[in-house]
Image (cartoon, rainbow, N blue to C red):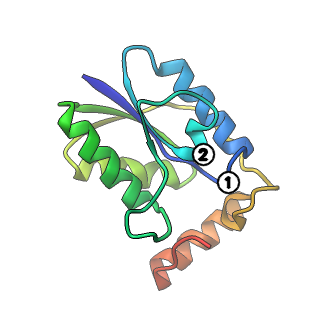
Amino acid sequence: MEAIVGFSFGSEGSKSNVALAKVVNKIRKGKITVLQKEIADCTKADMVVSKHPAGKYLDTEEVTRQAAFFLKKKNVRVVWVVAQPFLHRKKCTMLLRKQGFVVKTVPGRIPFDPNSKQWWTRSRFSFLVYAISQKTYGRRGH
């Protein structure tokens, strides 16, 4: 059994999430879909990840944890990761592999959205600054 895990990039309705939903639609046939809410708003999903159980910021690690819990119950072994290819997809791939999945990726470009509510998803430079602050200071979201 194969599945897709879609990690959002930016806020609801952003160009990035619309593009990620299009990728999901291209590869979805016969696969279980677990999508973060911002992507699921643009397409159908078998499971939607929308909240952190402790009310914290919903980060990539928590999306991975919830998706893995759901998919392991379904005996999924192969996961297609759909995520922003600039830095984010690599992190998502690593986290899913740590959960024991065989991970496949879909090549292609996903645009940044200069109008996103989340400043770190507006450009490559913004996301790079955010990634460095995450590694250096543990910064998450907002």
Q: Position of residue 126 (x, y in %)?
A: 69, 66
User: Residue 73, position in %: x, y?
Assistant: 19, 37
Q: Is residue 84 visible?
A: no
Tags 1 and 2 in contact by the CB under 8 Å rule?
Answer: yes
Point out which mark residue 77 bears.
none
Q: SS class of the residue under badge 2?
A: helix
Q: Residue at x 46, y 20 (%)?
A: 28
Quick check: 138 above or below 83?
Answer: below
Is 100 situated left or right of 37 in this image? left
Q: Amino acid at mark 1?
A: Ser
Q: Secondary structure at mark 1?
A: loop
Query: Which residue, as the protein is rendered here, is positioned at the far top?
Result: 29
Would you name the residue on which mark 2 appears? Answer: 38
Q: Which residue is mark 1?
A: 11
Residue 54 can be seen in this image: yes
Q: Position of residue 12 (x, y in %)?
A: 68, 48
